[in-house]
């Protein structure tokens, strides 16, 4: 067999030598190897390798980069070394890129965590694919969509609709109350809800003790969370079967313990009671025609949802005995959180709008950071033009150069990722505080894949243009220098591309600035607007124990506490809808329209306590015993009825003559997203649930201390859990407040990244034009003239960006404000201020560099000429 020369030596010969040189020496070396092999194979291999190396000369080098595919280890080692040296040499550009990219990536990671948490809300239930909520469309002048259904609808569905596997009724989320639970002398407040017997078969609030089929089957049982069991008993062992006293009224036996509601659940509660108890306490919900509770169903596998929706549309109408303005439909339960807004019966968005908004902001910030990298990498390309020229002369092809510079950008992206993860981890507690979430930076597979995708996208996007830009140059022109160098570096395409990217970058920044101004002004407006009643210095709390048994003595004693200006009670927290009524008839009403009115049931003095202004007529008074049969309407209701002089007019409520004794100004019980609805105020002291107390301004602390002492003595065993009404009102705009805060931070970060890029470009421009500056100074140009010369180009770019951004931001802000029934007017200074702020920030960004360049000694600029 013919002996073969060492493979590595032959590879070395083929990789690093010209073809004609290989042909000249390879044959001789192989022949010599065969002769020596007969004497000593080991010696022959050593001599062959030595002869290859001895004949190797630098003038025969074939570019190393051309042969990367043959040696990946050497390729990566070589590229890593070049990249490291390049970072070391140009520290300013390196740190600007690192700060910009890492900040952009950190924001993107935080927004990603928030978006994924929003998308996962209520998705943890095992029955998610078959879990639906029954929705109700109420057909009045417009269609109103609600989750409130009849209290006995679930039982009817399970009995009459074969496609339904499980169905349950439960009190809705806004009915969740803090109740008093007692074990001996220990009294604690906990949030509870009422639910049907199949509740734990439908929802995956995993039971650690108890049977899903049995825990709610007995009306005298209660299911508590693991955390509540520890609060009550300091353990979860041997707790099942023990009694708990509820509201000091009734004892329930613990039938099960569930792990608790996870953070990504919209329903947050501590215990569940059987819905039968709720029906006993509220017997109207045991009949058709009284909506309020929520109904949930799990469909059998293979059930056709479209067919089923058609089937249940008219399901409740025959049972309502002529009440025919209600239709039903099923909606996936887990979609309610993101898609909970309806307009005239049609799904019209919801929180998904904010998910989309912040996803777009994350993309914008990432694009701005990538633009910085692309601009700075392209701008500093002139420093590496000769490097490219030498490599091309030595045989490097365009593919290898592109691979090298893409590798540099990928390495920068990787370093930025490490920094970004560190930043995200440090900022996560503050981010959770702003968003009200419990996000964690867990490196699960989804996050890892997403981060790797971001890195790949960022690296390719940020490095693609510089790689293409550098690799296309003609090596002959690159190595000539002088005018050719300037001509190449100032190519029209490169200048336009760079300026276009800066324009796009600042356009996004200006849009974000305008958005922050508009959102901030709107939030200020909704929180400071006169909503029609005085919400300041008013506390409210639930009626429990002796307070609920007889409210009048309690209110009388409450008013005697120093610092309490007035007190009354109501069935509503005055925040959000607490039920509507129909059945009002009046002269001139269209008999075909069954109109719905908001309904508030109040005690004497509530209108005075809240400072609700009367337009005409009077409030309820103990001097008129007939007031229990009279009503007060708001302006919206009077307008709907078409009355000119409504006071003392008699209308029919549920077929009974009822007198209008007064008209209030319109006031808001819902957020300013909604128009003020027609409202009926009825005097029903025995059906009120919440106490309202007005506290004298400046005496809040001492008054509340006395109130707590009084309440403990008056209502022993109950804990006073009070809230301020104005804070409850602000809670209506939690989402908007968070959007405002996050937008403010993200807009600032976007501007910071944009300014970093502008700072880097200004630094490069000043360096590139250093000799020009020296010549101008020798010819008599002053510092101001030099500053103006260098900053004028950047000013023009930013002005163009402002002109493009302002109409876009006007359109976007207008679309967002349309979601409010009451909104601010957009003022000219919102946009002028945003543009001026962007311009000032741009001037500050380039000012330091231009001033530094203007003050340079011309001798230093021209000494090498």
Image (cartoon, rainbow, N blue to C red):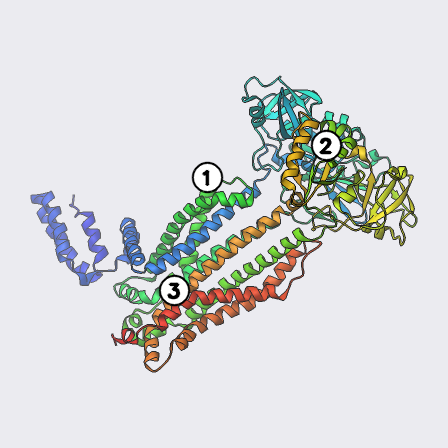
Mark nearer the viewer, 3 or 2? 2
Residue 597 coordinates in the image, percent (x, y): 81, 44
Query: Residue 46's spot in the image, x, y percent?
Result: 12, 47
Q: Callout 3: few (<14), some (14-19), or many (20+) C-alpha neighbours within 10 Å?
A: many
Tag 1: Cα neighbours inside 10 Å, few (<14), some, or many (≥20)? few
Asked whether the residues under the numbered discs 2 and 1 touch, taking CB atoms below 8 Å apart as contact, a structural biologist would say no
Disc 3 target residue: 378
Nearer to us in this view, 23 or 314: 314
Identify the residue under disc 1. Answer: 442
The answer to whether one can see residue 763 in this image is yes
Q: Where is residue 714 in the image (x, y as percent from the top left)?
A: 71, 28
Which of the two labelled residues, at mark 3 and mark 1, occupies the earlier sequence position? 3
The answer to whether 242 is drawn above or below residue 449 in the figure is above
Quadrant for the N terminus, please: top left
Quarter of the rendering containing residue 144: top right
Given the current orientation, which residue lies at the most extreme front position? 562
Q: Is residue 129 above or below residue 634?
A: above
Q: Nearer the viewer, residue 20 or 464?
A: 464
Residue extending farthest bottom = 779
The tag on residue 543 is 2
Q: Is the C-beta separation of discs 3 and 2 under 8 Å?
A: no
The numbered mark, 2 or 1, whose residue comes first in the sequence reads 1
Residue 576 screen position, x and y as percent: 71, 43
Secondary structure found at label 3 = helix
Tell me the mark number nearer the camera, choosing from 3 and 1: 1
Of marks 3 and 2, which one's residue comes earlier in the chain?
3
**Is any part of residue 488 visible from this angle?**
no
Which structural element holds mark 1? loop
Q: Please say if 147 is above or below 388.
A: above
Q: Which of marks 2 and 1 is in front?
A: 2
Q: What residue sits 74% from the left and 27% below the top?
A: 546
Rounded to the nearest angstrom, the CA distance separating label 2 from label 1 is 44 Å
């Amino acid at each position: 067999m013919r002996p073969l020369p060492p493979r590595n030596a032959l590879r070395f010969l083929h990789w690093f030598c010209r073809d004609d040189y290989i042909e000249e020496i390879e044959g001789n070396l192989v022949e010599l190897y065969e002769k020596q092999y007969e004497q000593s194979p080991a010696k022959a291999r050593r001599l062959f390798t030595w002869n290859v190396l001895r004949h190797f000369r630098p003038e025969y080098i074939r570019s190393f980069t051309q042969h990367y595919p043959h040696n990946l280890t050497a390729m990566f080692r070589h590229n890593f070394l070049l990249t490291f040296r390049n970072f070391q040499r140009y520290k300013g550009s390196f740190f600007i890129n690192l700060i910009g990219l890492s900040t952009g990536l950190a924001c993107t990671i935080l927004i990603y965590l928030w978006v994924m948490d929003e998308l996962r809300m209520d998705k943890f239930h095992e029955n998610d694919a078959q879990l639906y909520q029954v929705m109700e469309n109420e057909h009045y002048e417009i269609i109103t969509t609600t989750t409130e259904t009849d209290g006995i609808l679930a039982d009817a569905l399970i009995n009459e609709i074969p496609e339904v596997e499980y169905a349950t009724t439960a009190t809705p989320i806004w009915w969740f109350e803090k109740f008093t639970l007692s074990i001996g002398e220990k009294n604690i407040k906990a949030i509870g809800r009422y639910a049907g017997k199949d509740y734990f078969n439908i929802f995956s609030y995993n039971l650690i003790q108890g049977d899903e089929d049995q825990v709610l089957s007995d009306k005298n049982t209660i299911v508590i969370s693991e955390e509540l069991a520890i609060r009550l008993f300091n353990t979860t062992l041997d707790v099942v079967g023990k009694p708990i006293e509820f509201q000091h009224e009734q004892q329930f036996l613990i039938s099960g313990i569930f792990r608790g509601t996870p953070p990504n659940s919209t329903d947050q509660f501590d215990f569940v009671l059987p819905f039968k108890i709720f029906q006993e306490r509220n017997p109207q919900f045991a009949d058709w025609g009284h909506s309020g509770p929520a109904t949930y169903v799990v469909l059998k596998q293979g059930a056709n949802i479209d067919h089923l929706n058609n089937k249940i549309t008219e399901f409740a109408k025959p049972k309502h005995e002529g009440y025919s303005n209600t239709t039903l439909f099923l909606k996936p339960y887990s979609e309610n959180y993101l898609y909970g807004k309806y307009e005239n019966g049609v799904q019209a968005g919801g929180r998904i709008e904010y998910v989309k908004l912040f996803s777009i902001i994350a993309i914008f910030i990432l694009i701005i950071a990538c633009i910085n990298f692309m601009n700075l990498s392209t701008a500093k390309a002139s420093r590496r033009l000769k490097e490219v020229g030498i490599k091309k002369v030595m045989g490097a092809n365009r593919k290898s150069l592109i691979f090298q510079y893409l590798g540099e950008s990928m390495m920068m992206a990787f370093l930025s990722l490490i920094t970004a993860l560190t930043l995200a981890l440090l900022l996560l507690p503050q981010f959770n505080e702003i968003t009200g979430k419990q996000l964690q930076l867990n490196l699960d597979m989804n996050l890892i894949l997403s981060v790797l995708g971001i890195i790949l996208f960022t690296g390719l996007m940020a490095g693609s243009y510089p790689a293409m830009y550098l690799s296309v140059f003609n090596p002959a022109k690159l190595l000539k220098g002088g005018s050719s160098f300037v001509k190449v570096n100032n190519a029209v395409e490169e200048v336009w591309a760079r300026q276009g990217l800066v324009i796009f970058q600042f356009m996004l920044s200006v849009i974000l600035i305008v958005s922050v101004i508009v959102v901030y002004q709107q939030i200020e407006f909704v929180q400071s607007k006169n909503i029609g009643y005085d919400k300041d210095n008013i506390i409210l709390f639930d009626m429990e124990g002796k307070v609920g048994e007889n409210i009048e003595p309690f209110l009388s004693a409450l008013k005697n506490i120093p610092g309490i200006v007035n007190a009354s009670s109501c069935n509503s927290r005055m925040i959000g809808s607490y039920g509507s009524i129909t059945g009002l008839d009046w002269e001139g009403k269209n008999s075909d329209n069954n109109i719905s009115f908001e309904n508030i049931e109040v005690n004497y003095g509530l209108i005075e306590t809240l400072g609700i202004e009367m337009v005409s007529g009077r409030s309820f008074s103990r001097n008129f015993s007939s007031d229990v049969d009279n009503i007060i309407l708001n302006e919206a209701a009077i307008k709907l009825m078409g009355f000119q002089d409504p006071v003392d007019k008699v209308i029919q409520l549920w077929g009974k003559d009822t007198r209008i004794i007064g008209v209030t100004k319109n006031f808001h019980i819902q957020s300013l997203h909604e128009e003020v609805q027609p409202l009926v105020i009825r005097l029903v002291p025995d059906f009120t649930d919440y106490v309202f107390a007005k506290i004298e301004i400046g005496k809040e602390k001492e008054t509340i201390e006395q109130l707590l002492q009084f309440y403990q003595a008056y209502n022993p065993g109950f804990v006073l859990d009070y809230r301020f009404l104005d804070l409850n009102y602000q809670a209506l705009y939690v989402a908007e407040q968070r959007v405002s805060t996050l937008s403010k931070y993200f807009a600032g970060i976007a501007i910071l990244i944009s300014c970093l890029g502008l700072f880097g470009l200004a630094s490069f421009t000043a360096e590139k034009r250093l000799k020009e500056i020296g010549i101008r100074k020798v010819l008599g140009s002053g510092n101001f003239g030099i500053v103006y010369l260098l900053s004028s180009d950047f000013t023009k770019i930013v002005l163009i960006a402002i002109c493009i951004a302002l109409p876009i931001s006007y359109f976007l802000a207008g679309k967002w404000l349309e979601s409010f029934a009451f909104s601010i007017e957009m003022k000219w200074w919102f946009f002028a201020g945003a543009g001026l702020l962007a311009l000032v920030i741009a001037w500050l960004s380039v000012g330091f560099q231009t001033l530094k360049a203007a003050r340079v000694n011309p001798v230093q600029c021209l000494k090498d000429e």
